[in-house]
Image: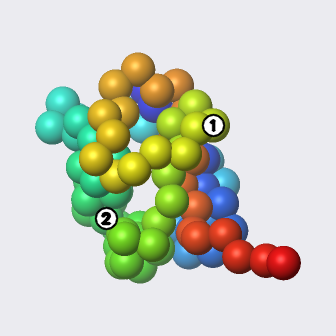
Amino acid sequence: MTRLVYFAWVRERIGKGEEEIDLPSSVVTVVDLLNHLKTLGEEYETALQYPDVIRVALDMEHVEHDEPISGAKEIGIFPPMTGG
């Protein structure tokens, strides 16, 4: 099981703050994960419709979309950060 934590408008569009899911063996990288999540329902597809702007952290460390996710205990998914 992998713990996914959603933040800001990603959380609002998916409708939950976190969940634990079993990932198929074909999900190897962050981009694989984002593509897989979009198949879980309309709310996921809407939240992740622009994957290039989605930020991801593996065990609280920001990573690029080509990063392998194996061994991560927690994956944070959130929109780009803004502010001043």
Q: Nearer the viewer, residue 43 or 35?
A: 35
Pick the front one: 14 or 32: 32
On the image, numbered disc 1 is attached to which residue?
A: 60
Q: Which label number is shown at residue 38?
A: 2
Toward which corner of the image does residue 11 lie, by quadrant? bottom right
Residue 18: percent from the left, percent from the top?
Answer: 61, 48
* Scheme of image coloration: rainbow
* Circle 2 or circle 1, nearest the eye: 1
| First of labels 2, 1 by sequence position | 2
75 relative to 39 in the view: left or right: right
Q: In the rendered view, tell whether residue 40 sits above or below residue 28.
A: below
Amino acid bearing label 1? Met
Q: Which residue lies at the image location 60% right of the left edge and 56% below the top edge?
A: 6
Residue at coordinates 50% horizontally, 51% vertically from top-left? 56
Amino acid under label 2?
A: Lys
Q: Position of residue 77 (x, y in %)?
A: 53, 55
Secondary-structure class at tag 2: helix
List x then y, in percent, for residue 58: 51, 37
Front position in the image: 48 or 54: 54
Identify whether 29 is placed above or below 45: above
Q: Residue at x 15, y 37 (%)?
A: 26
In this view, which residue lies farthest toward the top? 71
- Dot 2 surroundings within 10 Å: few (below 14), some, or many (20 or more)? some
Residue 69 vertical position relative to residue 55 in the rendered view, above or below: above
Res. 31 mark:
none
Q: Quadrant of the C terminus?
A: bottom right
